[in-house]
């Protein structure tokens, strides 16, 4: 529960009325980052945030939103627009999405929630917020050029069937690429 | 002479108004209409905002005026095929499709239709009801004569046999006439966006999912149910009705990114009508924005909320599902104000689709040499200063065929009169 | 027709049977597959979520390999398909991003030229081989088998990238019918299997696949046909996980379309391939295996 810190409150109750996040009961307005929307709009895949009209068509089809009230694509877009950076980037919120693109298919205006989600996740990772599963895949990619590798038995069977070998032929180039984009540092952070 | 004659293409309220204005000024008006009768969309409606008068009751006198006015010649079941010349002197070739009925002899008694063995879906009723192969599109049709739909006619000749006036002539041929006019007015109106293009809504698959025009036909006393609002699947009276706004409108997935401008208004009107009709029913409107601009509309919305108990839910639903047994419809939506994802079941769901250019608009524009905009609506010569002039001098545009301006009936009438004045201005310059 | 065969990571790691069936069936239908030497991970959902430029460059590297081979790419996995297809389309159309990616690729001596296309197995079977040819290759139709076909998300969405119109996706159903089996409609067919959240949020991933299985069970199918290894994993192994967590049993055998086709063409599956299906397929396909 957060409370309004400013001395200059009017008592107009705008903030609790507007607040869409269930856990917050009122909000410190000076904790909003009004540049957040612009930041997301300038992140690759994030431009759609400028076009969202909050119609709610995305949420009504989202498979995850039907399973948990924690995840709500429309509300996430709203939070970005209003500047709830600290409630979005360091939290679990970016990581519920399946990237199934049901939302994107239905969006009439180009808000493209499914794409904005990737932008949010990119920003979250830069702050060090990455689930263990994602970090593990990124690490595997850096170390072997693949996100998952076959175990011994699978490799043996491959050989017995005469199939092509699974190699790390591409690894050197992959590592060069990841060093160039800086992703190698994100991986090592974990 | 040409300067004293005008052609109006499209016999809806806008074209009718333009025709009457010009006729009373002494111009000879050729009113060309593709379907067998003039009247257009307004003839299909039940009641109109704000007076809640019956639409046909207001339209019919104007239609009769057109048919009786000595200066107006109706060319129904006809199409413009070619245009030559320029302002002051156009030569228009009009193809008169054969009705296979002599309009001068037919009394509209309908005995022929009673005996016709062929039944086909009635386009005027948005295919909810049936008509015969020889038919009058609606009871108040002008001209009051039957038409034979040759595509479905099996040429049994029964109609000809039964006709007491000897009006049926199955050997009629199409005729091309050349008319010399000083100006042309285009008022061909709109079609509805094909809602089947949105598969998650299920239009075309679910019986109790109708468009707003289909709803108008269900509510209208001259419609397929005699004005009784019943569900198409089982004929029961619907108790829970939903309207869904912006179906295909404001949607960049289709070429309809604009707001169609009249749907919010007419859906509130229909919602109030239904609540009056069936006080035991509930009506919910799913909207993104409620666009109720202009005189009296916002107040009407407020009355809908407070006096008539219409529920307004700010949400654009993602999908509709049908219960295979009851044929009830379940709408999945997020109440964006509450932030909750929910579903609700309704007996009848009305889609309010985008309004799009008429089929054939592009072809007509080509024949006229006029430009259309990116959506296919007729382009104004200058959208700010010459909004009813087309891009061809001497050809004017009115009604919804020029796009979603404010779009409702008074505006269409206004634009009809505007084009009449523009025609006169162009031809009477001193 | 010849294709650069993009295997991805999941299939060699966990679904060798899928690869084997593809290698056995496609040549019979006139499709030649050429292995891509040194291909790297396509950069699926997880990697895309980490860094945008890395995604583009990694996917583009694979596209460059295919360009050097002079062949279009065929993938089996929906994630691979989505990643490679999107990057291919974006770089073909956006000069600025293309320059940016090529700058990164210059580190490894490669350049994206936009010369190839990306297809998935269903594209190839439907478009290149054709339903008619598939049908005539089915010497022993699997008549009477009612299945729910799972096309997976990234074959069907987002529609504006994969198809021009918002039409329904019928290709997989038609292919299934060509084997003699019946593709039964079921609710929420286009819904995700939950795969992308595997290992990231297992609880939600399970719940999603459970919804899918519930819809399939309601439709009274005898089995499920998949084309993506993630869908297969979620719906096959997933049933065991769901049994553990929700104490529910669905007993819906899951089989890859290519395996179904293989059986329909009269070939038999090896013992280890049959066992690769956690929910036994011996029930519905007893004499065929």
Image: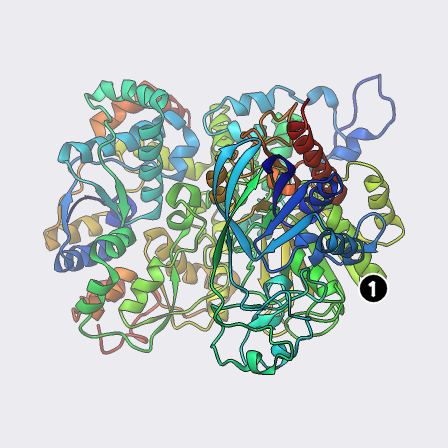
The 10 Å Cα crowd at callout 1, few under 14, some 14 to 19, many 20 or more, is few
**Quadrant including the C terminus of chain A:** top left
Q: Chain of mark 1?
A: B
Q: Residue at x 38, y 46 (%)?
A: C163
Q: Is residue B319 left or right of residue C42?
A: right
Spot the residue most to the right: B307
On the image, the x and y values in percent for residue B92 come to 51, 43
Whether B354 is drawn above or below A7: the answer is: below
Q: Residue C60: where, in percent of width, then height?
A: 28, 30
Residue at 73 percent across and 34 percent down: it is A19
Q: Which residue is mark 1?
A: B277
Q: Secondary structure at mark 1?
A: helix
Residue A23 visible within the image:
no
Kindly identify the residue that appears in the image at 38 percent across and 54 percent down.
C231
Q: How is the image coloured?
A: rainbow
Which quadrant of the view contains residue C179? bottom left
Return the x and y of residue B333 as percentages of the image width and height. Answer: 64, 51
Q: Quadrant of the N terminus of chain A?
A: top right
- Nearer to me, B124 or A121: B124
Image location of residue B249, percent across then percent down: 60, 43
Q: Residue furthest front?
A: B1
Q: Nearer the viewer, residue B367 or A28?
A: B367
Describe residue B31's horizontal placement relative to residue B282 as left or right: left
């Amino acid at each position: 529960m957060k409370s309004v810190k400013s001395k200059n409150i009017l008592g107009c109750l705008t903030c609790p009325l507007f607040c869409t996040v269930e856990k917050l009961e009122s909000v410190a307005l000076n904790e909003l980052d009004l540049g957040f929307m612009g930041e997301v709009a300038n992140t690759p895949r994030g431009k759609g945030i400028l076009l969202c009209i909050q119609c709610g068509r995305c949420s009504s089809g989202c498979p995850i939103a039907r399973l948990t009230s924690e995840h709500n694509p429309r509300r996430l877009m709203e939070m970005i627009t209003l500047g709830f950076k600290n409630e979005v980037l360091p939290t679990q919120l970016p990581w519920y999405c399946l990237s199934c693109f049901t939302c994107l298919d239905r969006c009439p205006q180009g808000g493209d929630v499914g794409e904005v989600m990737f932008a949010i996740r990119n920003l979250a990772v830069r702050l060090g917020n990455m689930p263990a599963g994602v970090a593990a895949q990124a690490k595997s990619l850096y170390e072997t050029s693949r996100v998952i590798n076959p175990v011994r038995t699978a490799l043996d069977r491959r050989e017995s069937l005469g199939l092509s070998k699974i190699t790390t032929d591409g690894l050197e180039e992959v590592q060069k690429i990841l060093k160039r984009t800086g992703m190698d540092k994100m991986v090592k952070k974990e | 002479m040409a300067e004293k004659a005008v052609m109006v293409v499209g016999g809806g309220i806008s074209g009718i108004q333009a025709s009457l204005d010009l006729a009373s000024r002494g111009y000879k008006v050729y009113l060309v209409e593709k379907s067998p009768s003039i009247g257009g969309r307004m003839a299909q409606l039940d009641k109109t905002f704000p007076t809640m008068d019956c639409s046909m009751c207001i339209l019919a006198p104007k239609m009769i005026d057109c048919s009786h006015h000595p200066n107006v010649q109706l060319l129904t079941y006809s199409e413009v095929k070619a245009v030559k010349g320029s302002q002051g002197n156009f030569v228009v070739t009009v193809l008169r499709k054969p009705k296979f009925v002599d309009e001068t002899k037919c009394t509209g008694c309908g005995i022929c239709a009673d005996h016709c063995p062929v039944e086909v879906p009635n386009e005027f009723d948005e295919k909810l009801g049936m008509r015969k192969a020889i038919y009058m599109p609606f009871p108040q049709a002008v001209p009051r004569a039957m038409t034979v739909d040759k595509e479905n006619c099996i040429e049994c000749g029964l109609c000809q046999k039964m006709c007491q006036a000897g009006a049926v002539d199955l050997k009629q041929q199409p005729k091309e006439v050349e008319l010399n006019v000083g100006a042309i007015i285009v008022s061909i109106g709109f079609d509805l966006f094909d809602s089947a293009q949105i598969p998650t809504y299920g239009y075309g698959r679910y019986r109790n999912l109708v468009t707003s025009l289909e709803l108008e036909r269900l509510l209208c006393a001259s419609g397929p149910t005699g004005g009784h609002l019943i569900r198409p699947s089982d004929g029961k009276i619907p108790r829970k009705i939903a309207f869904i706004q912006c179906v295909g409108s404001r949607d960049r997935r289709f070429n309809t990114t604009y707001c169609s401008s009249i749907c919010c208004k007419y859906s509130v009107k229909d919602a109030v009508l239904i609540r009056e009709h069936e006080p035991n029913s509930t009506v919910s409107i799913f909207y993104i924005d409620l666009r109720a601009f202009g005189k009296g509309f916002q107040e009407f919305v407020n009355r809908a909320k407070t006096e008539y108990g219409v529920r307004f839910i700010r949400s654009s639903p993602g999908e509709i599902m049908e219960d295979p047994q009851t044929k009830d419809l379940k709408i999945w939506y997020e109440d964006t104000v509450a932030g909750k994802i929910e579903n609700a079941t309704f007996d009848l769901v009305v889609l309010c689709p985008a309004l799009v250019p008429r089929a054939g608009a592009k072809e007509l524009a080509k024949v006229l040499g006029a430009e259309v905009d990116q959506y296919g609506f007729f382009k104004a010569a200058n959208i700010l200063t010459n909004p009813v002039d087309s891009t061809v001098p001497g050809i004017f545009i009115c009604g919804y065929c020029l796009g979603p301006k404010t779009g409702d009936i008074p505006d269409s009438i206004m634009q009809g009169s505007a084009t009449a004045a523009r025609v006169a201005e162009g031809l009477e310059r001193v | 027709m010849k294709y650069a065969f993009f295997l991805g990571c999941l299939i060699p790691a966990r679904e060798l049977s899928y690869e084997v069936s593809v290698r056995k069936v496609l040549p019979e239908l006139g499709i030649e597959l050429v292995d891509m030497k040194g291909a790297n991970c396509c950069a699926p959902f997880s990697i895309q979520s980490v860094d945008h430029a890395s995604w583009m460059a990694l996917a583009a590297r694979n596209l460059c390999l295919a360009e050097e081979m002079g062949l279009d790419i065929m993938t089996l996995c929906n994630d691979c398909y989505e990643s490679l297809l999107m990057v291919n389309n974006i770089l073909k159309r956006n000069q600025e991003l293309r320059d940016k990616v090529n700058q990164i690729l210059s580190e490894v001596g490669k350049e994206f030229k936009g010369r190839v296309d990306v297809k998935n197995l269903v594209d190839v079977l439907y478009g290149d081989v054709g339903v008619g040819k598939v049908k005539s290759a089915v010497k022993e139709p699997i008549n009477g088998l009612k299945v729910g076909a799972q096309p997976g998300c990234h074959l069907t969405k987002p529609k504006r990238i994969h198809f021009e119109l918002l039409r329904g996706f019928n290709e997989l159903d038609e292919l299934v019918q060509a084997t003699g089996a019946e593709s039964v409609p079921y609710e929420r067919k286009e819904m995700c299997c939950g795969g992308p959240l595997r290992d990231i949020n297992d609880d939600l991933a399970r719940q999603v696949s459970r919804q899918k299985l519930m819809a399939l069970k309601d439709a009274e199918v005898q089995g499920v046909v998949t084309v993506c290894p993630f869908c297969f994993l979620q719906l096959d192994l997933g049933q065991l996980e769901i049994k553990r967590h929700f104490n529910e049993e669905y007993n819906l055998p899951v089989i890859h379309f290519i395996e179904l086709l293989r059986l329909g063409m009269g070939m038999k599956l090896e013992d280890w391939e049959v066992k690769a299906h956690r929910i036994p397929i011996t029930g519905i396909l007893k004499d065929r295996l």
